[in-house]
């Protein structure tokens, strides 16, 4: 079980909204790492890791200094990751995965820009649940689907419970 996707999934699931800059870095790393690994399978593992780290650092810098662009990029990356993960989970592979990633990324970008707070909570919960499911490599598709749904709902609950608006209401 790969530890990095597992830790990234947990972080996205429970703290995506609060650690926005970190989430953009994690998503940038995961997408860059996964893309290079899928598209260039013969590339050395160290090079794949470096590409992921560079994209992750770039995403974090964008999130801190250029928040609007960071929000759009986070939406694109989360949407693409969610879309391509679901596409692969349904048994599809090959060149169509990149197209699905791009289409889902554009949709994720628009959703994130329009509904930032809730979109961030929902998309980071979905992405976190997807990374956790991939980490465990479940053989049973039905069980994996139920676990994905349950983890997503858990992430939404945890992140919405700790929202600034909720905190003000409780005080």
Image: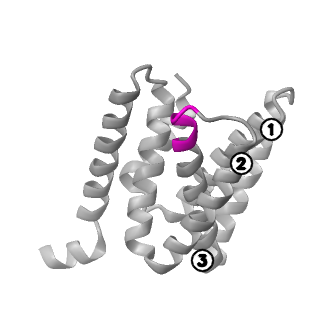
What's the distance in space between the residues labelled 3 and 1, CA to CA? 30 Å
Magenta stretch, main secondary structure, is helix
The residue positioned 60% from the left and 54% from the top of the image is: 80
Of pointers 3 and 2, the one earlier in the residue sequence: 3
Question: Which secondary structure lies at badge 2?
Answer: helix
> Magenta segment range?
86-91
Residue 141 image label: none
Position of residue 161 relative to residue 31, above or below, is below
Observer-nearest of 118 and 95 = 95
Q: Which residue is mark 1?
A: 39
Residue 27 seen in the current view: yes
Discs 2/1, front: 2
- SS state under label 1: helix
| Mark 3 lies on residue | 67
CB within 8 Å, label 3 to label 1: no
Could you tell me if the residues under marks 2 and 1 are in contact, i.e. CB atoms within 8 Å? Answer: yes
- The x and y percentages for residue 10 are 42, 42
x, y (%) of residue 78? 55, 57
Quick one: label 2, few (<14), some, or many (20+) residues within 10 Å? some
Of marks 3 and 1, the one in the foreground: 1
Relative height, residue 88 to residue 112 (above, below): above
Q: Which residue is mark 2?
A: 98
Q: Name the colouring of the figure.
A: one colour
Q: Quadrant of residue 117?
A: bottom left
């Amino acid at each position: 079980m790969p530890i990095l996707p597992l830790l990234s999934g947990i972080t996205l699931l429970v703290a995506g909204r609060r650690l926005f800059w970190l989430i953009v870095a994690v998503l940038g790393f995961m997408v860059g790492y996964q893309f290079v690994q899928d598209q260039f399978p013969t590339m050395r593992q160290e090079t794949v890791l470096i590409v992921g780290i560079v994209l992750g650092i770039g995403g974090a810098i964008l999130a801190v200094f250029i928040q609007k662009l960071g929000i759009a990029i986070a939406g694109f990356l989360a949407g693409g990751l969610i879309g391509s993960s679901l596409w692969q989970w349904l048994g599809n592979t090959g060149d169509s995965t990149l197209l699905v990633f791009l289409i889902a990324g554009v949709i994720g970008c628009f959703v994130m820009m329009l509904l930032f707070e809730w979109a961030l909570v929902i998309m980071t919960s979905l992405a976190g649940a997807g990374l956790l499911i991939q980490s465990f490599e479940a053989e049973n598709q039905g069980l994996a689907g139920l676990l994905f749904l349950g983890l997503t709902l858990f992430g939404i609950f945890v992140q919405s419970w700790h929202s600034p608006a909720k905190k003000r209401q409780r005080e």
